[in-house]
Image: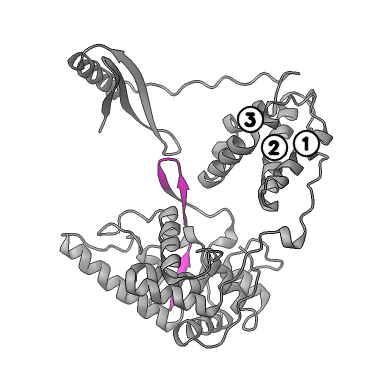
Amino acid sequence: MPGSMRERQPNVWELRVFLGRDANGKVRHGNQTFRGGKRAAERELSRLVAAAEDEPVPPPVVEAPRWNVRTTVNDAIQGWKDNGWEDLSPSTVRRYENMWMKHVHGSIGTERLTTLSPYDVEKYFRRLKADGLAEASVRQIRALMHRACRLARKWSGGVLPNPIADTELPTWALDERDEVRAPSLDEVRTLIATADKLDPSFATVLRLVAATGMRRGEVCALRWDDIDFSAGTVRISRSVVAAKGGAILKSPKTRASIRTVAIDSDTASILRRLELAQRSLAMACGLTIEPESFLFSSEPGGVFPPHPDAMSHTFATLRSNAKVAADVHMHSLRHFHATVLDPVISEAQKQTRLGWSTVKMARHYTDSVPEEDRRAAAHVGKMLTSGATGSGASTGSS
């Protein structure tokens, strides 16, 4: 709908006009307050819609901050947001925005760079720890502030200091750290069995994630032409990430994330059943499943990919129904996969299969699937299907 209106108080209306999308695909709206009767407000809304269609309202001009002795940490972060955040992924931008608003903006963010000392910054980090923040969260907050203040120093021509540069984080004892636990084989099989009763499509999601170790966003981005049933492989080359206003499809950050992995015959059969179910649903709606249709779309025809957050919410509900421990998350299935591969394949091949960017040796298997990887697929598939004994360690890698 190009325009909408609502009455905020008697004879005071908020008019909202759709202005299109920016270069990043983000929806833009124009808002205006109108005072008068309903019919007058409707006429004004029609005029604004027509004007927007003829000549869209340009986005507001962001005034560059002045880099001087009054510049604060918030100014530095805002400057980086206005001149740099467009290069980041939407999920990273959302994470930075949340950290900034929740932990920085109303506290250390108001401090001037010229008067903020490393001592004050380290006291701030210790307050965050005392408030219960995990080590990873405090480390990310420090990274956000450090990058912003480093850029502010550069943009000021070296006039401003970077008070974050020489700071150290507090230490966390082992019992204070939030270690990621790989779920046991029984927990994984219970989750899949419960999902099979409640939502067979989501049971296929869990089976595929556990059998391949792919990330949540990667499984959301899978299309039917990524599945090669004759070769028994899945091609992983895209990811769906949460963004303001919805979710978007993007390329991975590193080449290591683009990979082809083997799947076992049972997982392939489960995907075949899903394909038949999707085709039947699409046909009932007068649609068809195309090669570029998304595997796990909730829409008949698979035009739109599922939202990653919706996947996580569904998993949380399922976990509760299955009575599986709350420290098991959807991402934990990736840790399960990494853990059970330890006795089967080499570390280098495991890194390739999971798409880690920390591979120490040259990757020779970008487009081919070696026998070692097929052995990994068969091993995990047999465990998931028959319940063969496997191990569930307390840590894993993302």
- Between circles 3 and 2, the one closer to the viewer is 3
Residue at (68, 62) in percent of width and height: 358
Name the residue located 39 percent from the left edge and 74 percent from the top edge. 194
Whether 244 is among the magenta residues is yes
The three-letter amino acid code for the residue at tag 2 is Met
Which residue is labeled 2 in the image? 145
Viewer can see residue 329: yes
Quadrant of residue 268 within the rendered picture: bottom left
Residue at 46% from the left image edge and 48% from the top image edge: 242
Going by the image, does 8 lie left or right of 187?
left
Q: Which residues are magenta?
A: 230-247
Viewer-nearest of labels 1 and 2? 1
The numbered dot on residue 106 is 3
Identify the secondary structure beneath mark 1. helix
Q: Earlier in the sequence, mark 1 or mark 2?
A: 1
Which residue type does callout 3 highlight?
Gly
Mark 1 lies on residue: 121
Please identify the quadrant where the C terminus is shown. Answer: bottom right
